[in-house]
Image: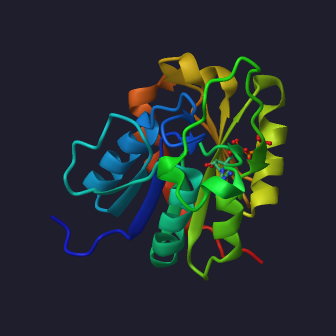
């Protein structure tokens, strides 16, 4: 065993569930598997790992990983506010909702007691944009901190969209994945860095091999000079 950890790695993973009322939510199909696998590999490699994990039924097998659970984007935002300032690197693998239902003003004081009634007229929901958590972290980063995001995009404009996202969110690197990764057992990803490197898996690799692949490439991100 090494005495000193490699550094403090904060990973977010899994879906967000945005409440519609006390019993209903709007979610997405993210399993969180990739982030959990990355947390396990990183912990084994000697990182001090905290995993912010959304509503999914998988958990890291490695008990060395500190796991903090969230449900909504607002929960995750609160956890990041606490934990981002004390990490050396953030890997934001969570599938954060872009929109959330607006809870009516009169229900906000007691959300647990708010349940929509059935109506033959149907239902219209209003949505508001969620904050961009990655951009928020990037805006409050201190020197030495590194931030890696993910981008799931249609294959035909993958690299172009991922590069634009890297710039827009002010992160150090972004893992670009084609949209069909979601239902596949393999992954064909490219790690694009702020200083112009594009490191590819070199074709599809099994998802189980992806976490160690990415972990090794994170060294490139750590070694990059500070952003201007
Ligand atoms: N992300 C975030 N906060 C959000 C939405 C996304 O921090 N409200 C993060 C994700 O965790 C991911 C990265 O931003 O690391 C890219 O997410 P993605 O959904 O691909 O991008 P969006 O910002 O939602 O942009 P678009 O919908 O235009 O693709």
Q: Position of residue 115 (x, y in %)?
A: 55, 39
Q: Nearer the viewer, residue 21 or 170?
A: 21
Q: Nearer the viewer, residue 58 or 42?
A: 58
Residue under the image location 26 percent in, 52 percent down:
44
Quadrant position of the N terminus in the picture: bottom left
Residue under the image location 57 percent in, 31 percent down:
28
Q: How many marks?
A: 0
Q: Is residue 105 above or below residue 176?
A: below
Residue under the image location 55 percent in, 17 percent down:
183
Give the quadrant of residue 98.
top right
Q: Position of residue 226 (x, y in %)?
A: 67, 76
Residue 212 appears in the picture as rendered = no
Q: Is residue 104 above or below residue 138?
A: above
Q: Is residue 224 above or below residue 176?
A: below
Display colour scheme: rainbow
Q: Nearer the viewer, residue 70 or 195?
A: 70
Quadrant position of the C terminus in the picture: bottom right
Residue 205 appears in the picture as rendered = yes
Q: Position of residue 177 (x, y in %)?
A: 65, 33
Residue sitting farthest toward the bottom: 143
Residue under the image location 52 percent in, 57 percent down:
110
Q: Position of residue 61 (x, y in %)?
A: 22, 42
Judged left or right of residue 197, residue 220 is left
């Amino acid at each position: 065993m090494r005495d000193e950890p490699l550094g403090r790695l904060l990973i977010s993973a899994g879906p967000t569930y945005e409440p519609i009322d006390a019993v209903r939510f709007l979610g997405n199909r993210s399993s969180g598997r990739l982030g959990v696998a990355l947390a396990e590999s990183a912990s084994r490699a000697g990182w001090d790992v905290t995993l912010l994990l959304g509503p999914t039924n998988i958990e890291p097998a490695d008990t060395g990983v500190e796991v903090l659970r969230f449900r909504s984007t607002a929960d995750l935002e609160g956890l990041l506010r606490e934990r981002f300032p004390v990490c050396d690197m953030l890997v934001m693998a969570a599938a954060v909702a872009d929109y959330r239902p607006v809870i009516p003003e009169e229900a906000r004081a007691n959300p647990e007691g708010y349940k929509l009634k059935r109506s033959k007229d149907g239902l219209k929901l209003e949505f508001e944009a969620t904050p961009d958590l990655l951009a928020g972290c990037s805006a409050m980063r201190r020197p030495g901190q590194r931030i890696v995001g993910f981008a799931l995009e249609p294959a035909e404009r993958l690299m172009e969209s991922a590069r634009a996202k890297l710039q827009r969110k002010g992160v150090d690197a972004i893992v670009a994945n084609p949209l069909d990764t979601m239902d596949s057992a393999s992954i064909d990803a490219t790690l694009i860095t702020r200083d112009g490197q594009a490191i590819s898996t070199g074709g599809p690799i099994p998802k189980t091999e992806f976490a160690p692949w990415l972990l090794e490439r994170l060294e490139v991100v750590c070694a990059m000079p500070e952003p201007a």
